[in-house]
């Protein structure tokens, strides 16, 4: 049985799922952070997150298949412990968290990082791998709350001076890991249920089209422009999250 959403809600959901697919396919998740806030304009954030997770897992299959072997395995393994920490904290705090507070903090973080990247290029000396654990922990937490793990992941990975392909592939595999970790807690907490699962199943073709379009677009964007797009996406996501938090 499908959820009883309005036409506006379904249109927002369709656009959000497509946007997330494009983001996963070729833009390292930068645009996908907008999805839950967009969907939350018409449905509750909890419903939005629960509906989106099965679709994210489907998108992960498509995206990982396209990017497998191009990722930095060491960087992914550095993230795994922190992802478990972040998701565990999110699970334990579920129900007592202020969604607006999380959005506000993440939005400010995104805007500050985007401004830094625009005003000051990445440091000549890459960031230490010791920052992987705290970055991954924040990523796991924000991903659990609103599928918004891209900003903390980008803050760590972009200064690591990976090539464009390696950067995208590493993000893609890491997102697949954290989404898989989240599935059990989401089902346990009731965020993923039979009603949301039917809606997710209906939207699988939209997710597939989005991923394919993202793959097509990224191969036609040069590396310098690509990073500018990622930075712009982070800035827009940040503004959107701040707006959601204070409005």
Image: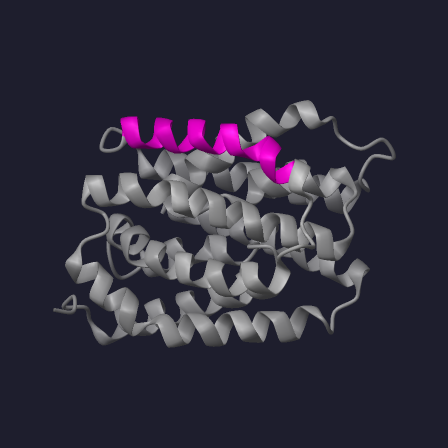
Looking at the image, residue 58 lies above or below residue 53: below
From the viewer's side, name the closer residue of 175 and 114.
Answer: 175
Q: In this view of the protein, which residue sits in the foreground, 130 or 6?
A: 130
Nearer to the camera, 208 or 66:
66
Q: Is residue 101 visible to the viewer in this orientation of the structure?
A: yes
Which residue is outermost to the right?
124
Judged left or right of residue 202, residue 109 is right
Q: Residue at x 16, y 69 (%)?
A: 2
Task: Indicate whether 132 appears above or below 60.
Answer: above
**Rendered residue at 38%/54% (across/down):** 37
Q: What's the magenta region?
A: 75-93
Q: Is residue 218 left or right of residue 204?
A: right
Q: Position of residue 69 (x, y in %)?
A: 67, 54
List x then y, in percent, for residue 107: 50, 42
On whether residue 139 falls in the magenta region, the answer is no
Q: Residue at x 28, y 58 (%)?
A: 51
92 within the magenta span: yes
Would you say the magenta stretch is mainly helix, strand or loop?
A: helix
> Residue 133: x percent and y percent?
57, 26
User: In the rendered image of this protein, does residue 169 appear above or below residue 25?
Assistant: above
* Percent of width and height locating residue 208: 45, 73
246 on left or right of 2: right
Q: Quadrant of residue 144?
A: top left
Q: Is residue 95 left or right of residue 57?
A: left
| Quarter of the rendering occupied by the N terminus | bottom left
- Residue visible at 33% across and 38% down? 99
């Amino acid at each position: 049985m499908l959820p009883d959403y309005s036409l506006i809600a379904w249109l927002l959901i369709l656009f959000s799922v497509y946007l997330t697919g494009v983001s996963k396919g070729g833009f390292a998740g930068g645009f996908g952070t907008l999805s839950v806030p967009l969907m939350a304009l018409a449905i509750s954030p909890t419903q939005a997150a629960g509906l989106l997770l099965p679709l994210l897992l489907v998108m992960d299959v498509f995206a990982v298949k396209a990017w497998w072997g191009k990722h930095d395995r060491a960087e992914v393994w550095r993230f795994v412990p922190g992802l478990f920490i972040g998701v565990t904290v999110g699970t334990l705090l579920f129900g007592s968290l202020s969604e607006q507070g999380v959005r506000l903090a993440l939005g400010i973080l995104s805007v500050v990082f985007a401004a830094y990247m625009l005003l000051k290029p990445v440091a000549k000396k890459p960031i230490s791998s010791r920052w992987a654990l705290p970055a991954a922990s924040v990523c796991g937490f924000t991903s659990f709350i609103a599928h918004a793990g891209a900003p903390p992941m980008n803050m760590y990975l972009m200064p690591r001076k990976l090539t464009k392909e390696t950067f995208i592939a590493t993000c893609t595999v890491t997102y697949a890991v954290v989404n898989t970790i989240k599935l059990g807690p989401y089902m346990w907490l009731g965020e993923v249920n039979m009603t949301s699962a039917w809606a997710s199943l209906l939207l699988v073709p939209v997710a597939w089209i989005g991923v394919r379009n993202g793959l097509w677009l990224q191969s036609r964007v040069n590396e310098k422009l690509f990073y500018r797009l990622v930075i712009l996406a982070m800035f827009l996501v940040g503004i959107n999250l701040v707006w959601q938090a204070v409005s």
